[in-house]
Image (cartoon, grey):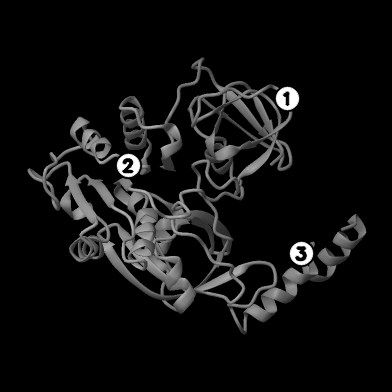
C-alpha cells in the first residue's frame, strides 16, 4: 500500500485500511462477521476451581480446526484496547468437528489484566477473535505408542485435549497421567478425569497434591512434589512418548530426571508454562529506548522488554508472554539482550527478537 493510499484512507476512515472501517460497521450488526480474522462466540461457561474457569466457544465457519494439544491466540477488546493472549484448547478436535465448539480453560493470573477480565466479564453471547491453532504438543500419528503425561496446575489443559481425543477412539494405547497440584482443591477437571479412569482400564490416573497426606486419586505413589518415585514409575512403564506441561521449575525437574534415567530426548514432548528468571551480569541501570514512539525507560530490574515497554506506557502486540507464539516479535536495532528461556546472549546489531523472553543487558533500542 502506497503512502498516498494510506493517507487517503486515514483521512476518510481514521484507519490505514479502509476495510477496517467497513468491518466495524458490519460487526455492529453481526459480531461474528469478519474478513480478516476468525471469530468465536461464548456459548457457555463454568468454574473449575476458585481461580480457574472453562469457556465453550462456537467458532465461525471459516476457522480451520486443530489437533489435540494445540493452542490458539485469543484477542479480546478491554475498555477499547485489543489484548492478545495464548491459551491451550482443552477439548477434543472430534467435538469441534461434530458440534463446532472448542473449550478454553483459563486460570486467573494474580493482577492479570486479561485473565482477570475474562473471569469477571466474559459471558455467553460475547465474541472474541481466534488465530489458527498452532503448537507441537500433539499426539503421534499413527497412534500405537504407550504414553505418559506429567502435568502440573493449569498444565493439564492440553493434556485434557489429548485424553478426550483418545477417549473418542476408545483409548487405543496404554496411557498414564501423573497430575500434580498444591492442594486437592487446585485440581482442574477432576470429574472428567476420574470418569475416564473409571471407564477405560488402559488409562491410569494419579492425582498428587503437595498438601495431602496421600494421593488424591490413584495408588502406589507418594504425595508431594514430583520426586524420584514418580520418575522411576514413569520409566518402569517403558513409555515411547512422554509429555510434560506445567510451570518452568516443574518442567525442568521432570525433564532432567527422565533424561538422566535414559529416556531418549526424542521421546520427550514439552509445553512451557512460564519462564525462568535470570540475573543481569552487572547490577547497573540499563536504558531501553523505543524509537518509533520516542520513549525510553531506565531499569535495574531483570524484566522482559515486553514488561518494560508496558511500564513505559506502550501497548505492544503480545500473546503468550512466554516465548511460544512469537506474536511479540519486533526489531532490536542495537544493544545486547539475554534470552530468559535459554540464557543465550544476542548480538549487538539489528535482529528480530521476542520481547516477552528478552531482557536488556546493555542499552537497547527497539523499533517500537
Q: Position of residue 222 (x, y in %)?
A: 13, 39
Q: Earlier in the sequence, mark 2 or mark 3?
A: 3
**Which residue reaches farthest bottom?**
29
Q: Is residue 51 visible?
A: yes
User: Which residue position is annotated with label 3?
Assistant: 15
Q: Is residue 80 above or below residue 185?
A: below
Q: Is residue 210 above or below residue 350?
A: below
Residue occupying image coordinates x 25% and y 34%: 231
Residue 353 or residue 282, whichever sits in front: 353
Spatial CA distance of label 2 from label 1 is: 45 Å
Residue occupying image coordinates x 21% and y 30%: 228
**Secondary structure found at label 2:** loop
Residue occupying image coordinates x 79% and y 65%: 17
Residue 239, disc: 2
Q: Nearer the viewer, mark 3 or mark 1?
A: 1
Q: On the picture, is 45 further left or further right than 295?
A: left
Q: Where, quadrant-wise, is the N terminus in this rendering? A: bottom right
Q: Quadrant of residue 82?
A: bottom right
Residue occupying image coordinates x 59% and y 38%: 355
Residue 79, disc: none
Spatial CA distance of label 2 from label 3 is: 54 Å
Q: Position of residue 339 (x, y in %)?
A: 54, 29
Q: Could you classify mark 2 by the number of other residues whose Cα lies within 10 Å: few (under 14), some (14-19), or many (20 or more)?
A: some
**Which residue reaches farthest top?**
282
Spatial CA distance of label 3 from label 1 is: 33 Å
Q: On the picture, is 48 further left or further right than 103?
A: left
Q: Could you classify mark 1 by the number of other residues whose Cα lies within 10 Å: few (under 14), some (14-19), or many (20 or more)?
A: few
**Secondary structure found at label 1:** loop
Q: Earlier in the sequence, mark 3 or mark 1?
A: 3
User: Which residue position is annotated with label 1?
Assistant: 349
Amino acid at each position: 500500500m502506497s503512502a498516498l493510499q494510506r493517507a487517503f484512507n486515514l483521512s476518510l476512515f481514521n484507519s490505514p485500511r479502509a476495510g477496517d472501517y467497513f468491518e466495524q460497521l458490519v460487526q455492529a450488526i453481526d459480531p461474528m462477521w469478519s474478513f480478516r480474522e476468525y471469530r468465536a462466540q461464548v456459548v457457555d461457561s463454568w468454574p473449575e476451581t476458585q481461580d480457574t474457569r472453562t469457556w465453550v466457544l462456537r467458532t465461525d465457519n471459516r476457522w480451520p480446526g486443530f489437533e489435540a494439544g494445540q493452542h490458539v491466540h485469543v484477542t479480546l477488546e478491554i475498555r477499547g484496547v485489543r489484548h492478545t493472549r495464548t491459551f491451550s484448547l482443552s477439548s477434543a478436535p472430534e467435538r469441534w468437528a461434530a458440534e463446532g465448539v472448542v473449550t478454553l480453560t483459563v486460570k486467573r493470573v494474580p493482577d492479570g489484566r486479561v485473565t482477570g477480565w475474562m473471569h469477571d466479564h466474559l459471558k455467553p453471547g460475547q465474541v472474541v477473535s481466534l488465530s489458527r491453532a498452532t503448537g507441537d504438543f500433539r499426539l503421534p500419528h499413527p497412534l500405537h505408542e504407550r504414553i505418559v503425561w506429567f502435568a502440573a496446575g493449569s498444565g493439564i489443559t492440553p493434556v485434557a485435549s489429548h485424553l478426550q481425543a483418545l477417549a473418542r477412539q476408545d483409548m487405543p494405547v496404554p496411557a498414564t497421567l501423573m497430575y500434580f497440584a498444591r492442594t486437592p482443591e487446585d485440581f482442574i477437571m477432576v470429574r472428567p478425569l476420574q470418569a475416564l479412569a473409571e471407564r477405560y482400564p488402559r488409562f491410569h490416573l494419579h492425582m498428587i497434591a503437595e498438601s495431602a497426606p496421600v494421593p488424591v486419586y490413584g495408588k502406589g505413589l507418594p504425595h508431594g512434589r514430583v520426586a524420584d518415585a514418580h520418575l522411576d514409575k514413569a520409566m518402569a512403564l517403558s513409555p515411547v512418548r512422554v509429555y510434560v506441561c506445567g510451570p518452568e521449575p516443574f518442567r525442568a525437574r521432570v525433564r532432567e530426571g527422565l533424561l538422566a534415567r535414559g529416556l531418549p530426548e526424542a521421546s520427550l514432548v514439552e509445553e512451557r508454562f512460564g519462564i525462568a528468571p535470570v540475573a543481569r551480569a552487572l547490577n547497573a541501570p540499563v536504558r531501553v529506548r523505543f524509537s518509533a514512539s520516542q520513549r525510553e525507560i531506565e531499569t535495574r530490574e531483570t524484566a522482559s522488554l515486553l514488561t518494560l515497554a508496558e511500564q513505559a506506557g506502550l501497548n505492544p502486540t503480545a500473546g503468550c508472554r512466554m516465548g511460544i507464539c512469537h506474536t511479540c516479535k519486533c526489531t532490536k536495532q542495537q544493544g545486547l539482550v539475554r534470552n530468559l528461556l535459554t540464557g543465550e546472549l544476542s548480538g549487538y546489531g539489528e535482529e528480530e527478537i521476542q520481547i516477552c523472553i528478552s531482557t536488556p543487558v546493555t542499552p537497547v533500542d527497539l523499533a517500537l
